[in-house]
Image (cartoon, helix red, strand yellow):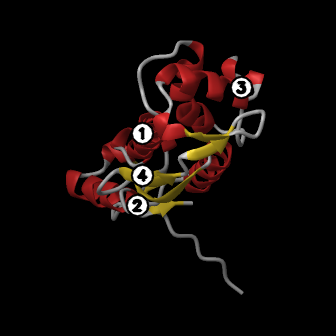
Amino acid sequence: MRIITKKIKAYSYKELPNDIKEKILSKQTEQEYHFNDDLINTLKKFCELMNCSWKEYDLYYRKNIIFDYENIDYDYNDNELNLDSLNFNQLHNHLKNKMPNKLIKESYSLTGVFLDYDILKPLIQFIKKPYKTTYKELLSDCFNGVLKSAISDYENQISEESIIEQEHEYCSDGKIIN
C-alpha cells in the first residue's frame, strides 16, 4: 500500500476571484432555510393557541403566509363568541382571559425558539395596550411578524457575510476543503 499526499492551495473566501465567489454565493442561495422545521412548529403551536390554521408560506418568492381562522370561539363560561363581531375592547378582554399569564409577561414560549416571540409580539402588545383592530388583522400582524423575521434570518443565512463568517477554506474552483 502507498499513501499519496497531494498539495492543494487553500484560499479564504476573500482571496478567491470574483467569478468563483459568485459561484459559491449562487450555491448558497439554493439552500433551504435552516430553521424551516422550527418555523413550522411555531406556526402549528400558534394556530392551536389562536384557533386558526396556516395553509402555506413562502420565504423565497412571494414572501407570504396564507392563513385561515375560525371566527367562533368560546369565553370562559362556554358562551359562543363571534370574533369578527367583537369590538377591540371585547376582543382584548377575550384574549386576555384566554391567554396564559406568562404570555403577557413576554416570557411565554410556544416551542422554545426565537420565532415564538416574533409571532406572539403583536398579540402581547395588544394584550398589554389594546388598540383598534380586528381578530383577523391581529392574526395577520402575528403571521407577518414571524414571516418578516424568518425572511430576514434566511437572507442573512444566504448572504456573502454569512459565507465569510463560516471561515471555510476553498480550492481554486470554489469547493470547500474539509
Dot in front, 1 or 3: 3
| Contact (Cβ within 8 Å) of mark 3 with mark 4 | no
User: In 3D space, how far apart are the residues under numbered discs 1 and 3 (Cα atoms)?
Assistant: 24 Å
Above or below — where is 177 with respect to 73?
Answer: below
| Contact (Cβ within 8 Å) of mark 1 with mark 3 | no
In-front residue for pair 6/158: 158
Above or below — where is 164 with respect to 66?
Answer: above
> Mark 4, residues whose alpha carbon is within 10 Å: few (<14), some, or many (≥20)?
some
Q: Residue furthest left?
A: 19
Residue 171 image point, x, y percent: 40, 61
Q: Which residue is mark 4?
A: 65
In-front residue for pair 74/8: 74
Dot in front, 3 or 4: 3
Residue 53 image point, x, y percent: 55, 55
User: In 3D space, how far apart are the residues under numbered discs 1 and 4 (Cα atoms)?
Assistant: 7 Å
> What amino acid type is highlighted by mark number 1?
Asn
Q: Quadrant of residue 73?
A: top right
Q: Which residue is mark 1?
A: 144
> What amino acid type is highlighted by mark number 3?
Asn
Q: Residue furthest top?
A: 129
Dot 1 or dot 4, earlier in sequence: 4
Secondary structure of residue under mark 4: strand
Q: Which residue is mark 2?
A: 171
Dot 1 or dot 3, earlier in sequence: 3
Residue 100 image point, x, y percent: 75, 28
Secondary structure of residue under mark 1: helix
Query: In percent of the image, x 54 and y 53: which residue is there?
Result: 34
Query: In percent of the image, x 51 and y 69: which residue is there?
Result: 6
> Mark 1, residues whose alpha carbon is within 10 Å: few (<14), some, or many (≥20)?
some
Tell me how many marks there are.
Answer: 4
Q: Which residue is mark 3?
A: 97
User: In 3D space, how far apart are the residues under numbered discs 4 and 2 (Cα atoms)?
Assistant: 40 Å
